[in-house]
Image (cartoon, rainbow, N blue to C red):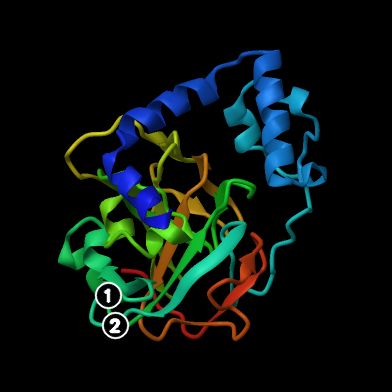
Amino acid sequence: MDKFKITLQYLLPKHLLSRLVGYLAAAKLGFISHALISLFIKAYKINMQEARHEKASDYASFNEFFTRPLKDGIRPLVADPAIVAHPVDGAISQLGDIVAGQLVQAKNHDYSLQSLLGGKAETAEPFAGGKFATIYLAPKDYHRIHMPVSGTLREMIYVPGELFSVNPLTAENVPDLFARNERVVTIFDTEFGPMALVLVGATIVASIETVWAGTVTPPTGKEVFRWQYPAEGLNSIRLEKGAEMGRFKLGSTVILAFPHGSIDFLADQQPGTVTRMGTAFANIKSAKTAD
């Protein structure tokens, strides 16, 4: 059955299917939308008591429900400036060292950091020998992404690609999964050097948004697009720790990369660990002045 599921993903028109689902998810269909949302809540056992609006009828479309805000204070932010916070609700898939430019995807599957970040060696070079973490967001999770530390946006990169599912089964069976799926790469300057925060698309992920650019994907294309941002001034973008930086419309994966010697993950952070946005993730070891 697992082999059949993987084969089916290669055969399906994933972009067409995802865009169709995205269109339907954005539609305001009245009681039909409310019924679908109610079914989704029951199927995935979503704790709506955490949501700012608890009833299915509070949401005009499925997308409004899926990107629902939480009640104020429901995700306390670790205040210590020497601690990296979790950026999302989800579960850790993998984390550890970046070895020879490779990240662990799953057992017996590594992939290239340079490819993940859009193909340029100079983008990946600051993270050589550093640390990475991959966090999977299940359909039941809160789907807004927040800043794990304060940072100033340096670059955003849209990388076109496939839209395979990013669930654990696919990660174990599709080579280079995260470096072949459509994604939005963001590079921030922080007190300890650069930080990469990558938002990976997946099957039926209708779109990826950032707070400064709105919807980045769709539309799709075959070219890599890059946007540069100034370090200061009118057009600079600085986001404080805990601030929302983006969101998925339907579930996916976030990948973080940090420079060598900059952070250490806390001992209780392991593959399979459930994450909650704002809780402690790693210790900051050193501070560096951004270029």
Residue annotated with mark 2? 99
Could you say which is closer to the camera, residue 90 or residue 166?
166
The percent position of residue 89, horizontal first and vertical second, equals 62, 57
Q: Percent position (x, y) of residue 256?
A: 43, 65
Residue 80, given in percent of the width and then of the height, sits at 67, 74
Question: What is the three-letter code of the residue carrying label 1?
Answer: Gln
**Residue at (33% x, 28% y) in the render:** 16
Q: Quadrant of the C terminus?
A: bottom left
Q: Is residue 130 left or right of residue 206?
A: left
Secondary structure at badge 1 equals: strand
Q: In the picture shown, does residue 248 fall above or below 185?
A: above
Name, please, the residue furthest toward the top.
30
Residue sticking out furthest to the right: 49
Residue at 77% x, 38% y is 52
Q: Quadrant of residue 270?
A: bottom right
In the rendered image of this protein, does residue 227 appear above or below residue 169? above
Q: Residue furthest front?
A: 1
Q: CA distance from mark 1 to mark 2?
A: 5 Å
Under tag 2, what secondary structure? loop
Residue bearing mark 1 = 102
Q: Position of residue 144 (x, y in %)?
A: 58, 46
- Residues at badges 1 and 2 in contact (C-beta under 8 Å)? yes
Q: Can the viewer see residue 230?
A: no
Q: Residues within 10 Å of mark 1 (few under 14, many from 20)?
A: some
Residue drawn at x 57%, y 30% is: 63
For the residue pair 150 and 249, the one nearer the viewer reads as: 249
Residue placed most toward the observer, 193 or 57: 57
Q: Amino acid at mark 2?
A: Val
